[in-house]
Image (cartoon, rainbow, N blue to C red):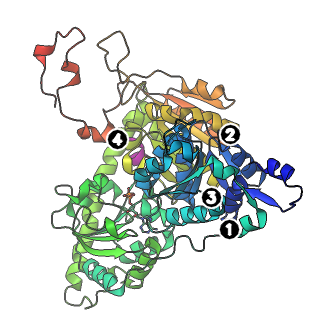
Amino acid sequence: MTMSEVSAKGAEEPAELTDGIHLVVDALKLNDVETIYGVVGIPITDMARLAQASGIRFVGFRHESDAGHAAAAAGFLTKKPGICLTVSAPGFLNGLVALANATTNCFPMVQISGSSERHIVDLQRGDYEEMDQLAAARPFAKAAYRVSRAEDIGRGIARAIRTAASGRPGGVYLDIPAAVLGEVMDSAAGAASLWKVVDAAPRQLPGPAAVDRAIDLLAGAKRPLVVLGKGAAYAQADEWIREFIETTGIPYLPMSMAKGVLPDDHPQSAATARSLALKRADVVLLVGARLNWLLSHGDAPTWSPDAKFIQVDVAAQEMDSNQPIAAPLVGDVGSVMELLLERSKPGMITARNGLTADADELVTARNEWREELKARSGKNVAKMAGRLEAAATAHPMKFLGALGAIRDVVAEHPEVRLVNEGANTLDLGRNTIGMSVPRHRLDSGTWGVMGIGMGYAIAAAVETGDPVVAVEGDSAFGFSGMEVETICRYKLPVITVVLNNSGVYRGDDASTTSDPAPTYLSARHDRLIEAFGGTGYRATTPAEVADALRAALAAGTPALIDCVIDPSDGTESGNIGHLNPKGLSATSAPTPAGTAATSRKKGN
Ligand code: ADP
């Protein structure tokens, strides 16, 4: 029954009524949700309208995956679950990629989806967009819940927000069938069924014995190293982290999304001596960073086989996932760093037994460690400067030529939120473009996934109001490129810079048939944005890239700079080419006519 049917029928019952749609919007408002990212359709269109009319900003996308990525990025930037709204079955499934990615990255978000009639879906009688969405979502989310009665909407939303934000943050799925959205109930009872979540992510502190254990280990380290991960950036505990690192003098290494927690030009940054730092460190303090593939699972030879690990993580199950953790510190980064800071003093940490006998020896060892890293850093920086200099004048333009120009302009605008994805564009971009402010870099993250670009960029602009520069490989951009229309429609200050080398990895692969090579792409991306009313630039030299970027930032309106990059510049799979299977080489595989069957060789 709809609300109007009820009011028409029930003239004798003048009770104020509400319905599921109103209750969802009221519950979100009560929990201070300011923005919903989504795509409308059956059965949630009216919910989007009502949310907008009620003062919640609704950002309408072209594809649910992008809306979901936006919600995830909003969660990372604000520490509050981003909300994504999707339609049933296919729309829900499109959003699920983002929900799974958010969960992997430990970003809090809630995907609310409409779904079809339960009594038809559950008997598989064949409904419009029939799917058991709850079951489908469960393996890909931190948690999945379904609301089956309008009176449970407030409970469902509170539960979703709590689960997404608390402990290890992640993606939560909330299924609300169309019938529940249309369900009518007494308005006073409905209002009474809603509540606001109190302290959605409570502080978590490790016990004193755990802190002592970690402190003792750190205090005795000759070559200590702090590794900051995106959990450290997420925690918004920048002051504690900075003070701890500066007080103790320990060198630190930022993972890509932790760049800017301390400025990249900080004298204690070991980023430019990364491999040496990992290989030689004897005690490693992981702060919101996992020993996953991005850190070679903590294995030798990347790491010293004798390295001891201290890990700060809100999730106890992360400990020992790859290496023995000698001193687990289970808690939120802010609380733990505050505790560690209490025990640190200039240049050192105070162990329980003091550090009398060995103190001088340790101070000397740590000074040598810093010098060792500094010397390697100096060499690497000089090498990189040479590569950048050579690229600056190379024609056709190289990745590094364009990235060097972007680096210079971004350095003039520390307020810029940088989004970065691609293969070569990501690998080279990460090392070229410096960050000086926390949470100003968003990238492919734990999965190394492509397709986050425009969703992350839109959320960064919407949530912060800062200008956004999305540095995209041409292939990566294609996954979310249509959202350029969304950027233009909402007039967001997003500048997309596409490093266009005409292909996935590279654009000069030979084809063995009359079709283009599997890796080949062909596009004038600057023309794409012009179709939607934005400003398109085409740049063929680093100077043109810099000029276009400066002009676009000054304008503060949607723009896209298509950078024409040498198609032969680019490495297969970027830095992670070794992950490709080493089977028979594709280029020596049989041709369609089967003539090469005898000439197959092992690839390498
Ligand atoms: P990176 O890829 O930058 O190394 P990861 O995503 O692998 O970072 O690791 C982030 C870790 O931070 C996760 O294990 C997550 O549980 C943890 N984490 C997230 N938020 C917090 C927080 N507020 N306090 C402590 N740990 C956190």
Residue pointed to by mark 1: 193
Instruction: State which tag comes first along the sequence, 1 or 3.
Output: 3
Residue pointed to by mark 3: 149
Tell me the CA gap for discs 1 and 3.
Answer: 11 Å
Residue type at the position of mark 3: Arg
Position of residue 243 relative to residue 106, above or below, is below
Position of residue 68 relative to residue 345, above or below, is above
Give the extent of the magenta segment: 428-434
Residue type at the position of mark 4: Gly
Position of residue 435 relative to residue 580, above or below, is below
- Write down the quadrant of residue 311 in the picture: bottom left
Label 2, residues with CA under 10 Å away: few <14, some 14-19, many ≥20: some
Residue at x 44%, y 31% (from the top left corner):
475
Residue at x 69%, y 41% (from the top left corner):
490
Residue pointed to by mark 2: 557
Label 3, residues with CA under 10 Å away: few <14, some 14-19, many ≥20: some
Q: Nearer the viewer, residue 213 or 58?
A: 58
Q: Nearer the viewer, mark 3 or mark 2?
A: 3
Residue pointed to by mark 4: 386
Tell me the CA gap for discs 4 and 3.
Answer: 65 Å
**Left/right of residue 522 with respect to residue 48 in the rendered view:** left
Tell me the CA gap for discs 1 and 4.
Answer: 65 Å
Label 1, residues with CA under 10 Å away: few <14, some 14-19, many ≥20: some
- Write down the quadrant of residue 242 in the picture: bottom left
Residue type at the position of mark 2: Thr
Q: Nearer the viewer, residue 529 or 585?
A: 585
Residue at x 23%, y 59% (from the top left corner):
298
Q: Secondary structure at mark 4?
A: helix
**Left/right of residue 52 with respect to residue 402 in the rendered view:** right
As for residue 86 lying within the magenta part, the answer is no
Tell me the CA gap for discs 3 and 2.
Answer: 44 Å
